[in-house]
Image: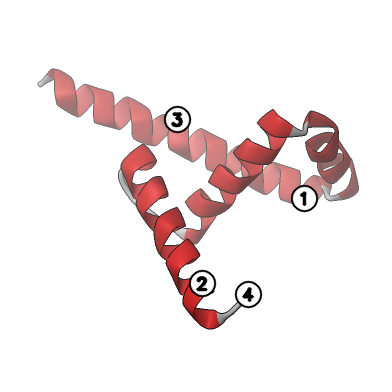
Amino acid sequence: MGNELDEKLEGLLDKYTELLLGESTDALKQWVIYSHIAKSMPPLAKHFNETYPEAKEEIKETIQRIKQMNEAHRANQDR
C-alpha cells in the first residue's frame, strides 16, 4: 500500500481504538486487530496462539488491561 493509504488506515484504526477504549496505543490497536480475527476466523487465531504462545500471553495481558480500563471508566461514570 502507498504511504498515503497507510497513513489514512492508521488514522482510522487510531480513531476506532480511541472511540472504543478511550485511548489509542499500539498494544490496544493490536488487540483490536486480534479480536476481529479471533471473531471472524477462530481457527486462525487458535493456530496463532499455538504457534506463538508468548504473543498469546501478551494479548491476554492487554485484554486484562482493557478490562481494568473499562472498570475504571464505569466507576468514574457512577460518580
Q: Which residue is mark 4?
A: 1
What amino acid type should be assigned to the residue bearing mark 3?
Answer: Lys
Q: Which residue is mark 2?
A: 5
Q: CA distance from mark 4 to mark 1?
A: 29 Å
Residue 35: quadrant of the picture: top right
Q: CA distance from mark 3 to mark 4?
A: 34 Å
Q: Which residue is mark 1?
A: 54
**Residue most extreme to the top:** 78
- Point 48% across, 78% down: residue: 4
Q: Which residue is mark 3?
A: 67
Q: Is residue 48 left or right of residue 67?
A: right
Q: CA distance from mark 2 to mark 1?
A: 31 Å
**Element type at mark 3:** helix
How many neighbours does mark 3 have within 10 angstroms: few (below 14), some (14-19), or many (20 or more)? Answer: few
**On screen, residue 69 above or below 52:** above
Sequence-wise, the earlier of marks 2 and 3 is 2
